[in-house]
Amino acid sequence: AWGRYRVYPSEGAHGDFAPRGWKQRQLAQAVESELGHCETEHVCCGAGLVRIYDFLRSDRAEHYAGLEFPELDAPGVSEAALAGGNELARKAVDIFLAILGQEAGNWGLRVLATGGVYIAGGITPRLLGRVELGAVRQAFLHRDSRFSPVIEKFPLRLVMDGNVGLLGAKEYALSILEMAPSGAI
């Protein structure tokens, strides 16, 4: 409807991951070795953040001689990245945020999201300190792409409200009530 935002539900994160750059290609190969294929969800969710961190822990250990990088869960990787002192956690978060930005830009192109691309979820607001450094936006804009001028026109927003799903369900239910014939409900 005119004047209203449209939400496009999907399971698009289960589509194939399209890596950018050699490090992401190596990550995709590692995930394919582990799981048989690599979808975006495998590298762009809480478990994906841990998968990226573990990939970095196993990658070229000689570069980190004498340093210990403990096993961490997703909140642990996030906290370690923000606190400093764990270089691999910071790198894992930066790779994660770049993948998130890439995927947001891809979806913006798929639906020509002139009303904006909204990133929701529990991890990203917790990483606001790293998000503000620009990795998400830089990957979203993809300056090397011939479609970068199109993507630039799409506002990119980070949803901070953890209840956005409930708020959306409420709005949808209210819109159904508005369309129902009088006395039908």
Image: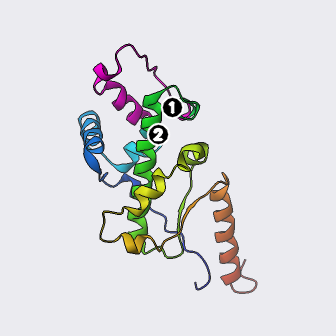
Q: Is residue 137 visible from the viewing direction of this image?
A: yes
Return the residue at label 2.
93
Within-10-Å neighbours for mark 1: few <14, some 14–19, many 20+? many
- Circles 1 and 2, Cβ within 8 Å, touching? The answer is yes
Within-10-Å neighbours for mark 2: few <14, some 14–19, many 20+? many
Q: Amino acid at mark 2?
A: Val
**Which region of the structure is painted magenta?**
50-78
- The answer to whether residue 168 is left or right of residue 149 is right
Q: Is residue 11 visible from the viewing direction of this image?
A: no
Regarding mark 1 in the picture, which secondary structure is present there?
A: helix
Give the x, y percent position of residue 174.
70, 73
Return the residue at label 1.
77
Quadrant of image for the N terminus: bottom right
How far apart marks 1 and 2 lie (CA) works out to 8 Å
Magenta span: chief secondary structure: helix
Q: Is residue 127 magenta?
A: no
Q: Closest to the observer: 114 or 15?
A: 114
Residue 165 occupies which quadrant of the picture? bottom right
Q: Amino acid at mark 1?
A: Val
Which residue: 41% across, 32% down?
Answer: 53
